[in-house]
Amino acid sequence: MVARITIDEQNFIKNAKNVIKDNKVMAVVKNDAYHFGLEFAVKSFIQAGIQTFSTTSLHEAVRIREIDKQVNIFLMNPSIEFETLKAHNIAMTLPSLTFYHEHIEDLAGVKLHLELENLLHRSGLKDQDEMLQVLKNNESLPIAEQAIIEGIWTHFGYADEFGGDEYETERQAWIDCLSFILDQGYAFKFIHAQNSASYVREDGLLNQHTHARLGIILYGSRPYSTLPTTLTEQNFTVTANVIQVRPIKKGETCGYSFQYTADKDCNIAVVDIGYGDGILKTRAKHDALINQKRYPIRGLMMSHMFVEVDDTIQSGDQVVMYGNDIRIDEFTFKGVGANSEQISALNHHSLIKEIR
């Protein structure tokens, strides 16, 4: 009996196809493709028809190039390893006007995507005037000294928020900036702003955009709670096993530091998974699925978990922490943590990983 992660490869590919439809997509594969495995995800997405990938790590960008020589690769974080970028045909973001002027000579021949800072304030040029300054300065240089400005982009940090007007504000700021730059006669191979939430809210690509930059929806999680579960299928399961079932009396406790005090005589299943395997403590405030029935989790330790069960549960029964009937995004909307946070926390060194 070993706790494990199981990924359905064909369902993963099928789900990606269903999500992208006929749109061009830039698949986000950062952080080892949300811990699904970079090589697995890139090869699967290529089979689904995706030819453009983005990550935040130059190391991962180089690995993508080693996996496939033809795909487009965009690095969302800046790098000063300019020769590596050119050698592996990797484009990167331009994070600020200061960065451009500091490295103007080194950027010759480097592929760039101009980034608008917008409401997130994480990275990017401040406004359309800074973008225009970079474009004009670049085209004033001799051809051999120019950067290759092939893209323009931003990130919608509030696309999954519905309590205010932030999304509309950042969306309009971006559209105004983009329209201004395009009206100056500039053209780009890549124009991208939409994440999973924006892609669904807009029912596809925004006008004048070449790609949607999709992450979590490709991996089977809804970007916000009002969406139907049919929108994207969860294509992996996290399962563990009941080691033994132990009776405890009313008033007795289980777990470190008296994690649970029984309010009645009950049975506690000891399960072979814990926070050392990447189960968040916030996740342990909810249920586990055993034999198609939900049971409350009563305690979480590094390698074990306690679940209160009935008399039908016995040693060897499978315990499902995540699956099609107990989805990651369900617990996101219950406040456990972001979809990506729950997935990325899973320990692929202690859990057995199976791709079927």
Image: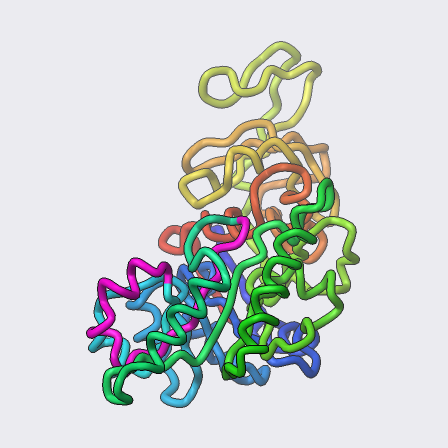
* Position of 292 relative to 210 (above/below): above
Name the residue nearer the viewer: 241 or 187. 187
Name the residue nearer the viewer: 114 or 351. 114
- The percent position of residue 289, horizontal first and vertical second, equals 67, 45
Relative placement, left or right, of 226 versus 167 is: right
- The percent position of residue 115, horizontal first and vertical second, equals 45, 64
Name the residue nearer the viewer: 327 or 166. 166
> Residue at point 30% right, 65% down?
100
Relative placement, left or right, of 148 versus 87 is: right
Relative placement, left or right, of 141 versus 12 is: left
* Position of 127 relative to 59 (above/below): above
Magenta stretch containing residue 99, yes or no? yes
Name the residue nearer the viewer: 241 or 261. 261
- The percent position of residue 313, horizontal first and vertical second, equals 67, 39
Relative placement, left or right, of 205 versus 144 is: right
Count of numbered tags: 0
Residue 186 seen:
yes
For the record, the magenta segment spans 95-119
Q: How is the image coloured?
A: rainbow
Query: What is the quadrant of the C terminus in the image?
Result: bottom right
Residue 10 seen:
no
* Position of 15 relative to 271 (above/below): below
Residue 244, quarter of the rendered image: top right
Which residue is the extreme one toward the top? 251
> Residue at point 61% right, 51% down?
322
> Residue at point 58% right, 85% down?
49
Magenta stretch containing residue 135, yes or no? no
Residue 286, quarter of the rendered image: top right
